[in-house]
Structure formats: C-alpha cells, structure tokens
Amino acid sequence: MCGVVGYVGYRKAAPILINGLKRLEYRGYDSAGLVALDKDNQPRRYRGVGRVKNLEKQIQGEDLVATCGISHTRWATHGKPTEGNAHPHADISNKFFVVHNGIIENHAKLRAQLEADGVTFSSETDTEVIVQLVGRNFKGSLEGAVEEVLKVIEGTFGIAVVSSEDPGKIVAARRGSPVVLGIGRDEMFIASDVGALVPYTDQVVYLEDNDLAVMTATDYQVLSFDHVPIKRKTSMIDWTVEEGERGDYPHFMLKEIYEQAETVRNAMRGRVQLSEGVAVLGGLQSKIHQIQHLKKLIIVSCGTSYHAGMIGRHIFENLTEISVEVELASEFRYRRLRLDETVGVIAISQSGETIDTLAAIREARRKGALTIGLVNVVGSTIARETECGVYCHAGPEIGVASTKIFVSQLVILNLMALLIGRYQSVSLSEGINIIKCLQELPDQISGILKNAPRLEELARKYEKFPNCLFIGRQIHHPVALEGALKLKEISYIHAEGYAAGEMKHGPISLIDENFPTLALVSGDASYEKMISNIQEIKARSGPVIIVTSKRTAEMDEFADDVFEVPSTHELLQPILSVVPLQLYSYYCARFRGCEIDKPRNLAKSVTVE
Ligand code: G6P
C-alpha cells in the first residue's frame, strides 16, 4: 500500500526521499511523487506514474538544495494512477502539501462543501480534501491547521504535511495507518515503515492512533489531536541495511526462499529445551496461566498468514486440548462474537499492520478475549496492541509474495502449541520428538533447495498452461491453498487450491490435457484417497505433478512428475512441502517474464480495508 517518507534536517532532502521510497517499493504502488521546500521556500513538486526510478529521472539535473520534504508511493484507491492523482497533493495556493496513506471516508461531503466555497480540485483523490482544508485553516501554525482538519476528517490516515508558510517543519498524524518517526542528530525522518529509515537511524518512535507529531531538524514533539503533549518511547530498529539488500540474488523472493533454513533456526533460537521437551516463549510468559486454561482459540489473519493459521488449527488440535477456529480477519471482525477471557485470539501477521487483522484484535479485546500476536515486524501496531505474543525474528521480507515468514509462522505455531500441550497431555517423549524434528528442518530445507534445478525444469514444462489446480488433504489442504496463492500472485497463472475430497464436487469438470494438477501426497491415512483422486485426474488426461515425502511405485506410475521432499513429523511436514511450491511459482513467474518482487496490483502490507 502507499508509502510515506519525509525528511527535515541539514542534508539535501531529495536523495533521502528517493532512497526511502525505493526501500518501500516492495509494499506495492503505481505512482510516486515528492515535494521539497527550497531555501527560499519555493515548493518544488515532482510526480509521475510508475516506478520510483521514473521520479528519480525527473529530478536528475534539477538543483534541489532543499533540506525539508515529503514523498509518497501511491497504491490507487480513489482515482486512477495518473500524475494528477499522485501525491503530494497541494492546496489551491500551492503552499501546503500532504502525503497520505489510508482512506478519507467522508471526502465526498467535504469536497462538496469546499467546492461550494469556490475551491477547485485538481485530483480525483480522497486525499486532496485534507490539504485544501489545511490551507483554509492556516493561521500561522501548521500543526494548528492540521489539528483543525483532524477534527473533521473521518476514516484512516497516516499523513505528513509541509508548508512554505511554516518552513522547516513536518507535521504528521496517524489514525489507522502506520507512522514512524526516525530520530537523528540535527535531522528527523518520518515513514510509513521502518524499512525506509534503516540506512539513516536506528532510533524510532512509533506513533499511536490519534497522535500528531511536529518535527523540525533538531526536535520533535508528539501531541494528542487536542494539543496535549504525549510521551512516546523511543525504540531501536533491529534490522540491518544488508538484510534489506538483494545481494547476488536476482530477486528478493529467491533470496528469501534461500534464507529459510536460517529463518527456521532464528524462529527456534533460545526457544526450546530439548531435555524437557518444552518450548520457552518469553512473550507468552506473563499470560501463561490464562493461556493454559483457554477453552477456545481463534486464529485470525489474511493472505499467506491465513494459510499459516489454517495449518495452525491442525497443530493446536493435535497438541492441545483447546478447540480451535481459524478465520479470515476481514470476516471475523463483522461476526456476532461471544468472546470472554476463556477465548484466546491469535493474530498472525507478517507486517503487524494489516488493517483487518488489527481491527479483529481490537474487536476481540473489546469483548474480553485474550489477544496474542504472532508478528514479524518488531514494534508494529499489532505487536503493540496484543496483550502477549511471539516475534518471528525473520528479518525483513521484501518480496510481496510471502515465503520465509510463512515458514517462520509455522515453526512458531508448533512451538506455541507445544508450550501449551506440555501443560496438557503431550508427553515428554512426544515433546522431545517434535523438538528433534524441528532441529532437523534447516538441513532438510537446504536439501530441497539443492534440488531447485528440478523445479526449474518442472516450471519450464508447465508454465505454458494458463491454469493450475493444487490439491491436498488434512494439513496439506492449506499448503495447496498457499501453493496456488504463490503461483497466481507472481506468475498470473490462474491457480486454485482445493481440498482433494472436493474434486468431484466441481473442479474435476475443468480437467483436461491442458489443465495440470499439483498434488500434495503424504503417507498418512489420506494416501489411498489421494491416489484415487490422482487416477481420476489421469482418467481425464490431466497432467499431474506430485510433491511427496513418501514416494511409491504407484506415484511414479500415475503421475507425470514426482518431486520428493524429506519426511518429518506430520505437523511439520508443511514446512518442507511448501518450499518446492514456492520455487516452482518463482520459476514459472521468471519464465513468464513477470515482475516477481512487485506483482501487479498487490501490496505487501494491506493497510486499507
Ligand atoms: C498481503 C501480502 C501477503 C500477506 C497478506 C497478509 O496480501 O501481499 O503476502 O500474506 O497481506 O499480511 P500480513 O502482514 O498480515 O501477514
């Protein structure tokens, strides 16, 4: 979604803004822009459709000495991606500028009022009302004007505002969309995502909802919307610049797939005690008594994190006595829920900022449930707003298609369930067995990655087909969903994930020689049924690729291709089975010439509803 970067200090603002925007490119966007206020306070605004590098070309050769500015990458919601709709937006006097992430819900009404008052709008965006109103309310202080506007706008926003009438200052405000301040020496930064700030400072202040911040080169202040000063603590960023770099990999997605052995190690580091067969999760310690006695767990999440949640249900069902539901956060929040302190709501979110997941935990908390976070980004809103939780510690994930964080989420769901299960009926030997299997995973993942050329071959063979079905049963059903999601989001091949038992209830009508199926077959009780499904597909001439941990002669007989993964504990098997699906999707996308790290229309962090 939209990215925001601002700078005020002693250095030239434009290169810092451009670099910051580049670091946010992974969030997904369709246009970009910046405004810099020169020494004489003449605003210099540049905007364009497409990539940040186009914006960079526009400012090449321009003498931009300004040391204060704001910038933006836009992911269109209101109005098409055009130069006129790109941020920063200006008021009619061309003295006030805003960049905005979020949606102003009452923009139509405000726009009509302003137009009736003679204001001519220059864009179709909801955002422009903010800046027109700031201009109208300005009486000498930029923060004063912004405070007036915050009283009338409804919806979600993370904004940054500058003006040539009150130079050397950035005013920011947040409700619903993330805003983080970067604190430097004689310079201050603002961004929608810490990733933009990593090269410049490791000291950050996360704004809470209904916070306003006023920044100058040497100082910052956080205030309520009613101008009451608020103390917000400074946090340290725990990412390094290198972690956000691609290195020798052609794409971040490939780099992240290859990091997964390490991701698993990081998710487990210091969190298991083999001799006791237990998991040690410091972030759950303060609530462990309540957690042990929960009657129900509801896992809420979106996208790939939702698939992790679906696998989590199997894990908790097998290792704990707690009944488990898993629900899309966007649906959960609108249900008539009966929640109390015997219900735990686990929010799984890579970014910790997904708006539906955030809304779901707010709703759960309001109704008295215990909220638990499983989040990667340290200090993110969901991490702050859940009562207890566990971090993935997987480092930044830049590729829009989530890979290493998914694997990390699965490891931690196993650790969470083991932690609870050992207070319940999981035996010492079962606990030890799971930990031993967890510890073997990194080497097993490395083994799969060594077979990447085989997946490249398979992708070469099948990428020409415009459709693909993924099927699996039990714990492998969500893996099938995840495989289909990966393929469609980056290669634009139409892919569907199905519980194999549903084949006869619809999807089989699609099967012919041009419609391949990727089947996840495990050696468990579902084996015979999966083999029957595969035969049914073959009887209709459908090509079949099997991914399995238990290769049999039957598989070789019925399938066109078989890819083997190492075998592990059945609750951990998805961690291994998903790796070839990620690589398969990656290579299909590469052969089809797709922009893998930034697929069209997608955003890494979905901060609007
Ligand atoms: C977007 C991303 C997905 C991600 C989903 C949930 O759709 O493109 O990769 O799985 O949001 O994000 P979260 O940060 O909450 O895990």
Image (cartoon, grey):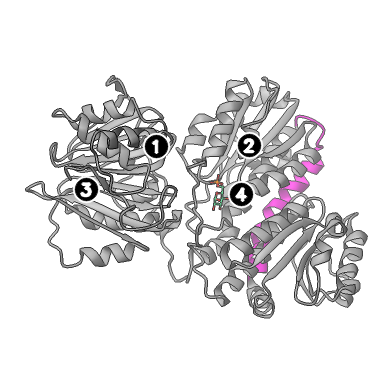
Q: Is mark 4 within 8 Å of ligand 1?
A: yes
Give the CA separation, mark 2 to mark 3.
46 Å
Q: Tell us which disc is closer to us: 1 or 3.
A: 1
Left/right placement of residue 62 relative to residue 577 reads left
Q: Report x, y in % for residue 300.
A: 64, 38
Left/right placement of residue 472 relative to residue 177 reads right
Q: Tell us which disc is closer to us: 1 or 4.
A: 1
Residue range highlighted in magenta: 423-449
Amino acid at the residue labelled 3: Gly
Q: Nearer the viewer, residue 407 or 191?
A: 191
Q: Tell us which disc is closer to us: 2 or 3.
A: 3
Amino acid at the residue labelled 2: Val
Dot 2: element: loop
Give the CA separation, mark 1 to mark 4.
31 Å
Circles 1 and 4 in contact, beta carbons < 8 Å: no
In the displayed structure, 271 sits above or below 146; it is below
Dot 4: element: helix
Left/right placement of residue 172 relative to residue 586 reads left
Give the CA separation, mark 1 to mark 3.
28 Å
Q: Earlier in the sequence, mark 2 or mark 3?
A: 3
Q: Report x, y in % for residue 311.
A: 72, 47
Assess whether residue 448 is covered by the magenta stretch.
yes
- Residue 303 is marked as 4
Q: Tell us which disc is closer to us: 2 or 1.
A: 1
Q: Which residue is under mark 2?
A: 280
Circles 2 and 3 in contact, beta carbons < 8 Å: no
Give the CA separation, mark 4 to mark 2.
28 Å
Which residue is pictured at 22% across the width and 29% down the height? Answer: 145
- Residue 69 is marked as 3
Q: Nearer the viewer, residue 49 or 113?
A: 113
Q: Which residue is under mark 1?
A: 108
